[in-house]
Image (spheres, grey):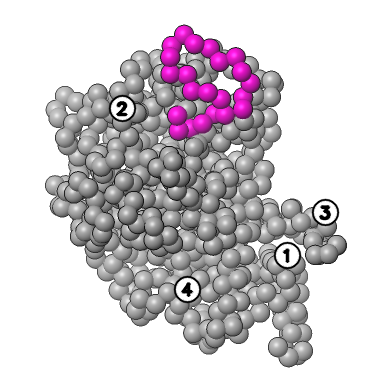
Amino acid sequence: MSGETHSKRSAAIALAVVAGIGLLAVSRAASQDQASEAYNPYPPGILPADVAAETARVRDEVRKAFDRALKEWKDLGPLTRQGNPPSIAGKGYAATSLLGELMNYDENISVNRNQACASCHMPYTGFGGPIPTVNLTMAAYPGSAHFRAAVRTPMRYSYASRFPVLYYDEAQQDFYGGNFWDGRATGFQLQNPNAEQATDPPVSAGEMAFADTACITYRLSQAQYRPLFESIWGAGSLDIEWPAETEKICSTPAGAAAFGNSATPLPLRPGERAKSDTAYDRWGQSISFYQSSPNVIAFSSKFDAYLAGNYTLTAQEMAGYKLFRGKGNCNSCHLDGASTLLADGTADTGAAADAAPLFTDFTYANIGLPLNPRVPSYYETMADSHGYTPNPAGFGFRDLGMGNFLRSVNGTNPNADWTKLAPQFDGAMQVVSARNAALTPSQCPTTEAGQLDADGKPVPYFQKGFFHNGYIKSLKQLVHFYNTRDLHAYPVTSGNCPAGKTEKVDCWPMPEVPNNVDKSIGNLGLTGEEEDQIVAFLQTLTDGYTTPFPNRDLFAGKCQTGGSAAAQGNETLIAAPDLPTCAREICGVAPEPQPPIR
């Protein structure tokens, strides 16, 4: 690079820093001026009526969080390096975490400059879905190219950065680690599954929808926080000679017919492509560092205080804790750092083996969830204005979870030795941490409908969606499903329970994937009161008790009231159609599911 070009680049960076909020305002205005034909192949009622207004509300919250992080960066001051190898002195943790936070809340890292990572993962829900009506209905969130949608519910990613690189344990015959519901972010390349997870949504057609990973690098090179990126990852690390058509390509959604099947439509020279790939890895590593920080992994719940001897569990909470570790069998997968007590009347007097338990065993399981006919991908069978058809299989699609990943149907399996294991893991989804399952905005203090306070007044609640397809709408339902799945099983699909039966109460539709269903749950023999006690214990895993949870105050939406936790959301149930046979492009990929899946 010539000295003149380098000087111009430095001047541009300086101008960006001085412009500050003004540059962001320009990019916001540009995104508002962009017009694209909305994709809406859905029957009435799949998209909630307030989806546009609620998306706008979340965008305002995301911008507020971005501006907070921007101020923190400006207040941080210059970075200096010491030692050999040189390392950022004193401020390295804070700077890298702030860089990841700025990236996390940057709407410009999406094809239409209208969606950040945080748009589907807000802190006040434990970094899960932030729109109650979406959680109640479609479950999977609209992406940057409206209204293409993701295939699954957004995973709560608090504590996800603690998962190890995916590996298969021959002795246990099980997979451990990785990220995503299906484990496809293995971590093998960066030795960090959380960092690799962060590199997927920007190029997912139903999410941030860039056609090329280099588009993220291109947008980072224009970011207000570029000086911070280069202070951490090296001067000139975003200096790339961009082709003349870069802006056009990076403003066209992934999957567009114009790109053919190319994952690299930007015609970069090999050296420039390598530099962009490195910068994209830095994107993932920076976001992962933020997600590893106390702003996300706080260990500030009542249960953490209890382990430290600074909180006494209530009688309801303690009863739930004992059930969690015993009759409820929850602790077999959601490890609490102590023992699992399956025999009534026994007592564990030992200290916790893990003072910061993650409440997961890092494995994958098929718990037998029914197909949720409200998931929008089932209806995405026609091409959008760019010639992209998200799901040609329609209701012939079956979410085989890890099985699809091991066959490279979804993601790329980097280990050929694992492919033969696919039939054993069909339907298996990640055992996520139970921590922050109950985290909600402060003004909506529960996930459960129908709760009353000490004065008998309704307690406002925040509607969440649970599990990979959002079929479960409350923690009460979640525990009841584990407890009675097999007791109230019917050979029907969702919305088609027999007359006189109430879905999710005394009727559970058949599993979407009947293979490999976990039989350690389904008929636990818990009473309704015992289910409520387990819910009370799960609520002790909510961060924000010992110290305020950062950015929990961002929520500017409305809480819900009324109803009951047992039948929560049932008013939005719709009947699944007669399901066609599982599509060949899913169930016909070798090694095929055994037994065959209809």
Instruction: Determine if the magenta segment contains residue 352.
Output: yes
Q: Which mark is residue 232?
A: 1
> Residue drawn at (24%, 23%), measured in percent from left and top?
487
The residue labelled by disc 4 is 212
Question: Which one is nearer the viewer's eye here, 413 or 205?
Answer: 413
Residue 238 visible in the picture: yes
Q: CA distance from mark 2 to mark 1?
A: 50 Å
Q: CA distance from mark 3 to mark 1?
A: 13 Å
Number of other residues with Cα within 10 Å of mark 4, as a class: few under 14, some 14 to 19, many 20 or more: many
**Quarter of the image where the N terminus is located:** bottom right
Q: Nearer the viewer, mark 3 or mark 2?
A: 2
What span is colored magenta in the figure?
332-353
Number of other residues with Cα within 10 Å of mark 2, as a class: few under 14, some 14 to 19, many 20 or more: many
Q: Amino acid at mark 4?
A: Asp
Q: Which mark is residue 90?
A: 3
Q: Where on the picture, by quarter, is residue 216?
A: bottom right
Residue contact at pointers 4 and 2, CB within 8 angstroms: no
Q: Amino acid at mark 2?
A: Gly
Q: Nearer the viewer, mark 2 or mark 1?
A: 2
Residue 495 visible in the picture: no
Task: Work out whether 101 lies above or below 8.
Answer: above
Q: Earlier in the sequence, mark 4 or mark 3?
A: 3
Q: Main secondary structure of the magenta part?
A: loop
Q: CA distance from mark 4 to mark 2?
A: 44 Å
